[in-house]
Image (cartoon, rainbow, N blue to C red):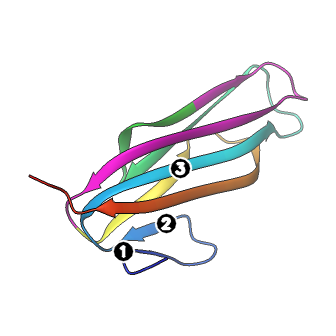
Amino acid sequence: MGTSLSHQPGSSEIVVTAPGVYHAYFHSTVSTQPGASIPAILTIDLALNGETIQGASATHTFVSSAETSTLSFTVPFQVTSTPSILQAIPYQTGFNFINCSLTVVRLGDATV
C-alpha cells in the first residue's frame, strides 16, 4: 500500500497520510436481501472526511427481488490535509455486496 495510504482489515476507512492527487476505482456486484421492498434504490458515494467527492457516486433502482446489478465509478480527487479518511458509503440498507473492491492510487503531488 505504500506510505500514502493505510487500511486496517475489517475497517471501512482508508486513511490518506500524504497530500496529493489520487484516483479511486470502486466496483461491486449488489443484490437485494430477501424480503426487501421493491422497487429498491441503492446509492453508494465515495466520501473524503465525510463529504461526498464530486463524481464519485453510483445509483441503481432494483425492480425485481431476484435482480443483481453492478455498481461502479472511477474518479480523481485531491487531498490537501492529512490525515484524511476515505470511505465508500452505501446510503440504504437491505442489500448484499459481493466482490466489492475499492482501489486507490496516488498519482502525484498537486500543482498550484
Magenta region = 59-81
91, 55: nearer the viewer? 55
Give percent across and percent down for residue 56. Answer: 45, 39
- Give yes or no for residue 73 being in the magenta stretch: yes
Cα separation, mark 2 vs mark 3, equals: 15 Å
Disc 3: which residue: 25
Residue drawn at point x = 75 percent, y = 41 percent = 30
Chain-order first, disc 1 or disc 3? 1
**Foreground label between 2 and 1:** 1
Q: Is 81 displayed left or right of 69 in the figure?
A: left
Q: Amino acid at mark 2?
A: Glu
Q: Amino acid at mark 1?
A: Ser
Q: In the rendering, which numbered label is found on residue 13? A: 2
Q: On residue 4, which mark appears?
A: 1
Residue 49 visible somewhere in the drawing:
no
Left or right: where does residue 7 sit relative to residue 70?
left
